[in-house]
Image (cartoon, rainbow, N blue to C red):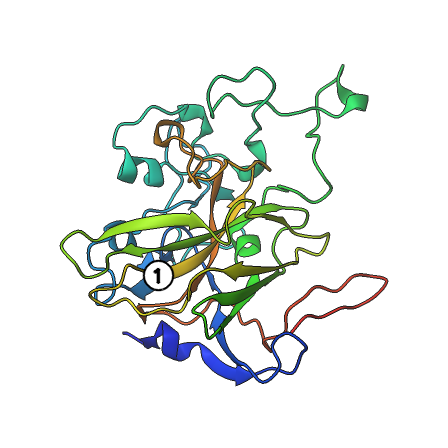
Amino acid sequence: MKLAKAGLVALTVAVSSVSFAAKKVQVFPGYISHGINVYNGELIADYSSTSPGVEWLFEAPREIGVFIEGAPEGTDGGVITAETDRSLPVATTRDFLDFFNPGGEIDLSLLNVPLDQIGSNFFGFTAVDDRIIPPSFDTVEEDPEVYRSAGVNAAPTVGDWEKARGVMTAVVHKDGTSTVRITLRDAFPNAVFTLWDIGSSRPLSDTEEGYAVPLGGIPNVVRTDANGCVFREVELPYDITRACELGAGSCTSYVAGFYHWDGQAYGASPAATFANAPGGVYAGNQMVWPVNGELLQEPATRFGKPIHGCRTPRRSFFKY
């Protein structure tokens, strides 16, 4: 059942701070995601009235699955549903690849494996799926242990994936630009994310097509702290809350928090080359902030008050 229009669910509040004083702030709740516009195998939002020509918003390819123990090599990760045991590990899937490039080549040994088993590119690699697990220096002559920051890629379960909380706020200025602030909390610690504006060019027209652009431009990479928190503010040369209407040049469907579980970013594309797609194998949407469309679900987690910022052990700081 449809709940409400995303832009209407986004509260309009007045916030007292130096930069946002006496300005109207639209607040957009974050939605845990298992792929493009999908959670528990169901659509997060219905974009049929705003971006009917953007196929991926409706087909909603998965970017994570659930680990199927004992399955043959090359088996796809299982579909996560409301009935899935949340203590099972998150696993890789090729659903994203099959949607965008059916039959595309990929290393089948990378499918249906827990996220901590995905290595990284290394010096001399020739393709995105040339992977290696970097050993720590003190174990290089023994059975290698993963050489990563503490807490990163610790074989997360479905339940771990779904602990993250997020909020996005936007202020639209008189000149048509906007200030966007995003906070993600309780995500994976010391983890690499990229932020993306996902939307539609020429909405509702015969030539409508989808787009994905780095939010605020390059660099759009952020890293969570030891508590799984990150805050980012960006200035956009456009109104991110602009309506999807006939005659508009473009409109934003949602903003994506794209988690790179291999700890690497892929330039100005969230998917590198589709033939060796990171989507579902090396990275995937963990949280989305719908801006337009009709919401079909409640957020899986609640952020609480729309207060931005992270807390450190030595001092607390919050940005409004």
Q: Is residue 292 left or right of residue 287?
A: left
Question: Where the C terminus falls, by quadrant?
Answer: bottom right
Q: Mark 1: which secondary structure?
A: strand
Task: Work out whether residue 88 can be spotted.
Answer: no
Q: Position of residue 246 (x, y in %)?
A: 20, 66
Q: Amino acid at mark 1?
A: Ser
Question: Which residue is painted at 13% across and 54% down in the image?
Answer: 206
Mark 1 residue crowding within 10 angstroms, few (<14) / some (14–19) / many (20+): many
Q: Nearer the viewer, residue 101 or 69?
A: 101
Measured from the top left, where is residue 299 in percent x and y? 45, 69
Please give left or right for residue 45 compared with residue 32 in the image.
left
Who is closer to the viewer here, 290 or 226?
Answer: 290
- Which residue is denoted by mark 1 in the rendering? 253
Q: Give 113 or 2, whichever is nearer the viewer.
A: 2
Q: Residue at x 68, y 47 (%)?
A: 190
Tell me the quarter of the picture where residue 255 sits: bottom left
Residue at the spot 35% in from the left edge and 32% down from the top edge:
274
The percent coordinates of residue 36 (x first, y second) are 36, 52
Disc tally is 1
User: Can you say whether 58 is above or below 309 in the image?
Assistant: above
Residue extending farthest to the front is 175
